[in-house]
Each structure stands twice: as C-alpha cells, then as structure tokens.
Amino acid sequence: MPDSSPPPSPNSPWENGWTPDSSRAPGTRRLYLAGALAVATIAVCVTAIVVTDKQTDDTSHTKRADPSTLPGADGPGLLSFASPSKQGTPTPDEHTSTAVKTPSASASAAAAEHSPKPSAKTPSPSKSASSHGSSSGSSGSSGSSGSSSSTTWKSVRSVNYPDRYWQVSGGLVKLNPVSSTAARRAATFKLVKGLAKSSCYSFATADGTYLRHRNFILRAERNDGSALFKQDATFCPRPSSTSGAVMLESVNYPGRFLRHQNFQLKLDRYQNSSQYRSDSAFRLVAGLN
C-alpha cells in the first residue's frame, strides 16, 4: 500500500524546537567560521613576524652600540685576513733618528735561507786584561771562537787579500797594505766590549775614535754618547766558512755584515756567494803597531 502521508511543512520546527532559517543559503555558517579562523591565523602569523623582527633589530642595535662586541662573534661569517705589515729596507737617512732600526724581512731571510750561514751564537770577549801588543801574533788566533781581551789591540786582515788590513784613511776605513809605521798605527785597533751589546765587539783607535757605520760605510768617528752611535759601532762576530776567520754582523742591522768592496769597508746584506763570503771574512791578528 503506498505511503500517502503528507510531507512535513517546511516551516515546521525541528525536534529541538529550532526553526530553520530559510533566509540564508545552506552551509553559510561553516564558511563564516572558516573565514574567521583564517583571519585569526593570519593575524597571529603577522604578530609573530613583527615581534621577531623587532627582537632582531634590538639585538643588532645593541651589538653596534657595544664596541667590545667583535664582528662575527654570534656565528660563522666571512673569513677576514689581516693586512700585511709594511716592511722596507732601512735607508741611510734613518741615522738621523736615535730609535733602534728594524731590519727588513728580506735582509733576515737572505742571511738565513742558504747554507753555509753564520751562527747566531755570539762569543763574548774575554775579561782578562792584556797589555798593548801582548796578544798572540799567529794568523787567525781569534778565529771563529772570537775570544779576546777587553783591552787587546788587534789588526784586522782580509782573507782573500792577506797582505791588506783595515786601515783608517781620511776618516774612512779602507783595506790597504801597510808599509810604514804610520800605516801600521792606523791599522791597529783596541778591541773592546760592544758599546751596545757586551757580548759583541767595538773597535777603538789609538786617538780615541770608534769605528762605526754611517750610510752603511765604515768610518772612524768620536763617540757622541747617543744610543744610535753605540749601535752603529757594535759588531757581533760570527763563524766564517773560512777556518780561523770571522764575519762581523751589525747589531742594529741583523743580516748585514762588514765586507770590503773596491777595498772600501761597508755594511752589506748577506749573499750566498763565494765572493761575498771571501770579502766578508777577516782574521783578528795581533796589533801591527
């Protein structure tokens, strides 16, 4: 039998007593709720971003305001390298200053990179006293040991020109043969403890001057009492490649040694050549005067 019961009235209330709202399309409430939830989510995200940016800006301002904060302290960053210091070869005009001069890196490297090289160990002059001319007269008696009396009179003989000696001539020190009493006197020096370093040597003349380098040329001048003069007049003995001979290194220009060139004594940078080693090798022998 067919169901002939009439359909419920569209305006009849539901079982809970609510009356459907026919003025809205179905599902509108859910759309409103979803939209409200999306807006709330966007608002929360924006708020979080603003707060995070503000904290980051505050941290950045604090680091810039604090000079003790090192760049890159909060994490890894770009690598940075220190700029190389400026170094240069000392020039003769530096003798106008009383400051201790720093040798150039190339001068030190030149003296150290090749073999044979002079030893850095400096022998100290002996403290025992001796009279004028009482030192041993044998060739190379000082030798590489470099020991001598603080009041010993010495002459300095060239290795590759054994008939020539250091001699004061016109205020400069030349490598000359000695054939007269005056020449022998000018070629005899008092070997004393270094004016700037007691373990090294200074050379005094009979008339009270000292041998010092100025503009890298060896000359005889009176001691003016300055620190620069004392440094210029101090030379440290180093063993030579020639047995019984020494090389004399400047105390304030390490890597530069006294050598003769055109029979003129000068301070020259170390060179790994047989010519340089011969020109810079000397024997400290008994005083000629």
Image (cartoon, rainbow, N blue to C red):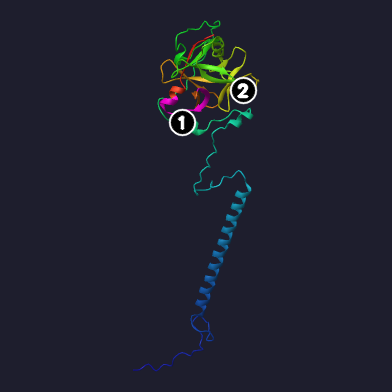
Q: Is residue 24 left or right of residue 98?
A: left
- The correct choice, above or below, for 264 with respect to 180 in the image is below
Quarter the C terminus occupies: top right
- The correct choice, above or below, for 49 with respect to 231 in the image is below
Disc on res. 56 = none
Locate residue 160, reporting x and y percent.
Answer: 43, 19
Instruction: Answer yes or no: is residue 233 visible.
Output: no
Locate residue 162, reporting x and y percent.
Answer: 45, 16
> What is the spatial separation of the Cα atoms under label 1 and label 2, in whole angstroms?
25 Å
Magenta-tinted stretch: 263-276
Q: Secondary structure at mark 2?
A: helix
Q: Secondary structure at mark 1?
A: helix
Residue designated by label 1: 110
Q: Three-letter amino acid code at disc 1?
A: Ala
> Mark 1 or mark 2, which has the lower sequence index?
1
Instruction: Answer yes or no: is residue 40 visible.
Output: yes
Residue designated by label 2: 229
Locate residue 130, reporting x and y percent.
Answer: 54, 6
User: Which residue occupies 46% across, 23% down?
Assistant: 279
Q: Three-letter amino acid code at disc 2?
A: Phe
Work out whether residue 55 or residue 175 is closer to the camera in this orientation and state it: 175
Quarter the N terminus occupies: bottom left
Outermost residue, front side:
179
Outermost residue, left side:
1
